């Protein structure tokens, strides 16, 4: 059977070809988000005949004269019955240049929970407004969340531009308002596009009805937005998933490539969360702090001279240091100090409230530790005007969809980065020790939103300058 | 370092690394994982990824096949060869045994796909498995579009789509109560085309029926159904010999063929790329039972 022969020596087909871009949508009810997503799927030929048949039948049953593209994103039975979207859904489309993974985040019910989830992995946020309404409260909230989650790019889709007669003045006013909002929230890379998702203007095809707009279409923007991941250019972070010490050899076809499996092999398997690594690089093992050199980077496809953020590999070290699951291999340049006392922005995602003194688990990288909530220092008031920033209100508890400032004491020190600099290793989740539920999403360190509030200074003092050994 | 070296990963590299990361997390944090393996292309890709995830050590868990008793003989033969090749011990849960001793009854429509749920759940319970890998992809079906990578199942094996844990960054939370288990979907972000691109890039063997071959078929309910012992021709049906292949490989009673001349993975990629029918829509009678057929089966504990 399996004819494999020499293929493993070459990963050539894996390294050629298109790249991957992750995006998340956000918008309030009736901004036409489902229609926009449906239009992207439809106009990139990602909708196939039987699905479209189904949509046409349902549209006809509902008395519509053409296919309602919003139906393409229909999900669960309850959603169809109630005509609403409950939960984040993932959609896939591709062009010759790129494959797109789209986290479709519902706008109304639990918008924080959904937008935070979608934003956590997104390279781009596609934010929608209705051209007739412009930037509204919901837009400010969504952008604040995207800013907190450090999504690198934001594109504002000014939808239903057909309903304002393709007016340049309306578009310019919204774009100006949005630029002011983005600047105050510290969102640097933004772009605005006039769109009619229903008519298809500027989604995939350039519209002749907006001659005053000379920027890209939505798809054109997504195909060309810079995807040189910031992560790759940053410092190495490699959470160790497990220690590879084979007691017996792998089967064919990889057995022949196994490096000397004679009981001496010891490597560390994991995914590079940020930065890059080469054999010979000096690294530090956190939280212990031992320094050593990278001996080799192994993969079943052969050893690598260079591995970058996003790659799953095995790293071998040239000295016998003690490394186990949960440790982080980091660049010696500015490694995170292992800390037991962290201040973080916490997005609360559970029905049960968070109160002072709560005992929870903190999952970070590949480690998990017990934690106690020392204090809840405030909750973010997302009702704010463009040009200002949200402010913190004092609170005793966090409830579902709140974004708060929380101080946690950890049972064992974790090398947590500042989320502002390292999205992957500055993030953690809060887990219920009793039933295992995911309660909250934590962003360590100061938030970019509130650079001028009292809380930041306080939290910056707690972070990261403490705990004996650390970077100097 | 040149800019060329700093270019982002390709789609397939990124997907492969993500899946390997997921598979390793499960092995490191659960006490008794098992991988569902039907011999279908998605499960072969998943097993291949598992082998790569643990290299240079062997795969540290076994695989489970829920055998409907109506599987294509080519697929069963492939299944046995593949588990030997990749080195994963095979367990079989047999729907036929359940029918023989009365724990399950044949359905009037003859399909055995929905009957797999009980033997599957029994095998999970008896084996004490707390993590069960499945090859499901989010692009397959609308109920799957909302499935988490780590998806909780209660004591009854049920999925509650309205009560799922948020899943953020690549921090997968597999904590669960005794009696519950977690379904793991390492291929969540792969599409049908990604799977074929990967099969071609890695030269992975799949059952021969995925490639064009001659077969006696009849056109029934808008689908090409193979004439077999399990699915004989009905009175009045015209049986024709055609070059066909299968896009999905399930139970013979509910999996239909498509007319095709694609004899290699590259041919299939061309064909899939041009196809105007979704994978399940073309070939799976079990999803046609109702608008929410997949959602209903998943809620009850199906794959």
Image: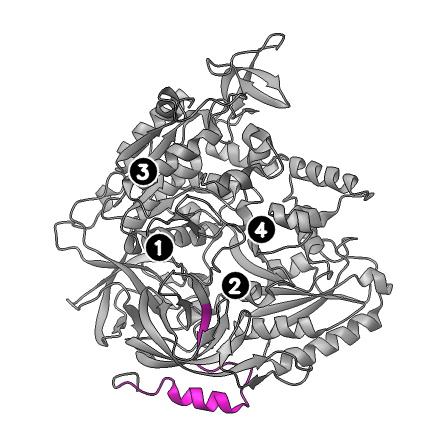
Specify few, some or many for label 3: CA neighbours under 10 Å numbering under 14, 14-19, or 20 or more: many
Pair 1/4: label in front: 1
Callouts 1 and 3 close, C-beta under 8 Å:
no
Q: Earlier in the sequence, mark 2 or mark 4?
A: 4
Whole-number angstrom distance, CA of label 3 to CA of label 4:
29 Å
* Mark 1, secondary structure of its residue: loop
**Disc ID at residue B63:** 3
Specify few, some or many for label 1: CA neighbours under 10 Å numbering under 14, 14-19, or 20 or more: few
For the residues beneath circles 1 and 4, the answer to whether they share a chain is no
Callouts 2 and 4 close, C-beta under 8 Å:
no
For the residues beneath circles 3 and 2, the answer to whether they share a chain is no
Indicate the quadrant containing the C terminus of chain A: top left, top right, bottom left or bottom right.
bottom left
Whole-number angstrom distance, CA of label 2 to CA of label 4:
15 Å
Q: Which residue is mark 1?
A: B177
Specify few, some or many for label 4: CA neighbours under 10 Å numbering under 14, 14-19, or 20 or more: many
Question: Which range is magenta?
Answer: A440-467
Q: Residue A344 vs residue B140: left or right?
A: left
> Which residue is at the front of the view, A98 or A60?
A60
Q: Position of residue A246 (x, y in %)?
A: 18, 50
Whole-number angstrom distance, CA of label 1 to CA of label 3:
23 Å
> Which residue is at the front of the view, B137 or B13?
B137
Pointer 4 chain: A
């Amino acid at each position: 059977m399996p004819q494999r022969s020499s293929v493993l020596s070459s990963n050539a087909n894996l390294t050629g070809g298109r790249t991957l871009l992750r995006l998340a949508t956000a918008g309030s009810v009736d901004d036409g988000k489902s229609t926009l997503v449906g239009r992207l799927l439809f106009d990139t030929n990602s909708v196939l005949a039987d699905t479209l048949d189904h949509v046409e039948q349902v549209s006809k049953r509902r008395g519509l004269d053409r296919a309602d593209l919003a139906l393409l994103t229909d999900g669960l039975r309850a959603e169809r019955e109630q005509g609403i979207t409950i939960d984040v859904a993932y959609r896939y489309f591709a062009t010759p240049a790129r494959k797109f993974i789209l986290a479709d985040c519902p706008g109304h019910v639990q918008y924080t929970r959904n937008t935070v989830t979608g934003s956590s992995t997104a390279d781009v946020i596609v934010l929608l407004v209705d051209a007739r309404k412009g930037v509204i409260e919901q837009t400010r909230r969504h952008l604040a969340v995207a800013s907190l989650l450090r999504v690198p790019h934001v594109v504002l889709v000014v939808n239903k531009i057909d309903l304002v007669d393709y007016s340049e003045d309306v578009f310019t006013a919204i774009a100006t308002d949005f630029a002011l909002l983005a600047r105050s929230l510290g969102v640097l890379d933004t772009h605005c596009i006039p769109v009619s998702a229903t008519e298809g203007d500027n989604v995939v095809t350039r519209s002749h009805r907006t001659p005053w707009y000379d920027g890209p279409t939505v798809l054109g923007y997504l195909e060309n937005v810079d995807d040189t991941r910031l992560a790759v250019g940053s410092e190495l972070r490699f959470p160790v998933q497990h220690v590879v010490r084979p007691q017996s050899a792998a089967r064919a076809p990889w057995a022949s490539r196994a490096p000397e499996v004679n009981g001496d092999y010891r490597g560390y398997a994991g995914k590079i969360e940020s930065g890059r690594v080469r054999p010979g690089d000096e690294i530090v093992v956190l939280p212990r702090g031992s320094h050593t050199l990278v001996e080799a980077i192994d993969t079943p496809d052969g050893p690598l001279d260079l591995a970058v953020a996003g790659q799953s590999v095995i790293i071998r070290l040239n000295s016998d240091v003690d490394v186990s699951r949960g440790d982080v291999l980091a660049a010696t340049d500015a490694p995170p100090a292992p800390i037991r006392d962290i201040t973080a922005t916490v997005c609360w995602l559970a029905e049960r409230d968070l109160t002072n003194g709560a005992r929870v688990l903190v999952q970070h990288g590949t480690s998990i530790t017990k934690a106690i909530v020392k204090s809840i220092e405030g909750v973010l008031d997302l009702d704010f005007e463009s040009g200002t920033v949200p402010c913190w209100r004092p609170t005793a508890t966090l409830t579902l969809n709140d974004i708060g400032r929380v101080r946690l004491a950890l049972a064992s020190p974790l090398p947590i980065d500042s989320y502002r600099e390292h999205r992957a290793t500055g993030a953690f989740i809060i887990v219920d020790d009793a039933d295992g539920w995911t309660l909250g999403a934590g962003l360590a360190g100061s938030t970019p939103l509130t650079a001028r509030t009292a809380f930041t200074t306080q939290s910056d003092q707690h972070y990261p300058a403490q705990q004996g050994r650390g970077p100097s | 370092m040149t800019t060329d070296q700093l270019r982002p990963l390709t789609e397939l590299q990124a997907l492969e690394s993500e899946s390997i990361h997921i598979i390793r997390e499960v092995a490191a944090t659960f006490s008794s994982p098992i991988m569902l393996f039907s011999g279908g292309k998605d499960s072969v890709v998943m097993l291949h990824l598992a082998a790569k995830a643990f290299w240079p050590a062997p795969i540290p868990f076994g695989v489970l096949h829920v055998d409907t008793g109506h599987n294509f003989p080519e697929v069963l033969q492939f299944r046995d060869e593949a588990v030997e090749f990749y080195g994963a011990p095979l367990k079989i849960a047999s729907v036929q045994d359940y029918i023989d001793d009365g724990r399950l009854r044949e359905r009037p429509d003859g399909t055995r796909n929905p009957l797999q749920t009980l033997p599957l759940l029994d095998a999970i319970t008896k084996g004490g498995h707390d993590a069960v890998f499945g090859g499901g992809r989010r692009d397959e079906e609308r109920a799957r579009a909302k499935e988490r990578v780590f998806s909780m199942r209660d004591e009854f094996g049920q999925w509650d789509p309205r009560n799922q844990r948020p899943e953020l960054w690549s921090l997968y939370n597999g904590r669960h109560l005794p009696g519950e288990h977690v379904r793991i979907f390492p291929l969540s972000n792969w599409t049908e085309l990604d799977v074929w691109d990967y099969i071609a890039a890695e030269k992975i063997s799949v059952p021969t029926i995925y490639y064009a071959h001659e077969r006696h078929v009849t056109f029934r309910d808008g689908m090409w159904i193979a004439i077999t012992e399990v699915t004989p021709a009905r009175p009045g049906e015209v049986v024709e010999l055609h070059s066909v292949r299968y896009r999905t490989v399930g139970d013979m009673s509910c999996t239909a063929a498509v007319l095709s001349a694609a004899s290699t993975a590259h041919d299939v990629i061309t064909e899939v790329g041009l196809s105007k029918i979704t994978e399940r829509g073309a070939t799976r009678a079990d999803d046609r039972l109702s608008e929410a057929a997949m959602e209903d089966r998943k809620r009850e504990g199906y794959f």
